[in-house]
Image (tube, grey):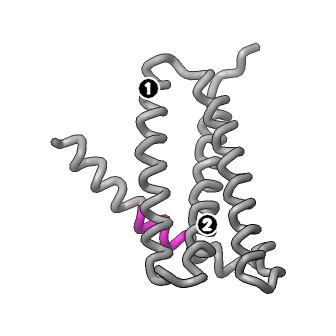
Amino acid sequence: MRKKLWLITLISVLTSFSFLSVAQEEQSSKAPCDKYETTADMRNCLEQRYEAADKALNEVYKQLRSKLSKKCQTQLKETQLWWIKFRDLSAAFEASEAEGGSMYPLVYNSVLRTITEKRVEELKKRLKKMPSEN
């Protein structure tokens, strides 16, 4: 029970920071997908960018996992499963204002990409801290 309460609290705090960060990042930089004029083209662009971020995440996750002890591998896996839930719920929440509209998939995929890219950077930092195999 304490573990679940702790996780809920952690997710709440992370969500608050994530929403601010996502909003600031999206406003501060012109996304490459802005060059498209149709919603369908923008959606395809954002989906491709999210898929690229997800692929990078899987690669760095595998690299990091291979350098960890069995215990830490289990912890990383559990953490990653919670993180995926957090990412998906965050994207759904951010996009909820556009529910049922053509903007929903644009917002949803944009948030997925942004949060996933941030997770890639977090795992890369952890990977750099790992001792080299030399």
Q: Nearer the viewer, residue 127 or 43?
A: 43
Q: Is residue 89 left or right of residue 61?
A: left
Q: Which residue is mark 2?
A: 109
Q: Secondary structure at mark 2?
A: helix
Real-space CA distance between mark 1 and mark 2, rounded to the nearest whole angstrom:
29 Å
Q: Which residue is mark 1?
A: 74
Residue drawn at x 80%, y 86% as measured from the top left: 37
Q: Secondary structure at mark 1?
A: helix
The location of residue 48, given as percent across then percent down, is 74, 60
Query: Which quadrant of the rendered structure holds the N terminus?
Result: top left
Residue drawn at x 18%, y 42% as measured from the top left: 2
User: Callout 1: few (<14), some (14-19), or many (20+) C-alpha neighbours within 10 Å?
Assistant: few
Query: Where does the magenta region start and end?
Result: 15-21
Q: Amino acid at mark 2?
A: Asn
**Magenta span contains residue 16:** yes
Q: Amino acid at mark 1?
A: Thr
Q: Nearer the viewer, residue 75 or 51?
A: 51
**Residue furthest out toward the right:** 35
The location of residue 30, given as percent across then percent down, is 76, 78
Q: Where residue 44 is drawn, which disc sits there?
A: none
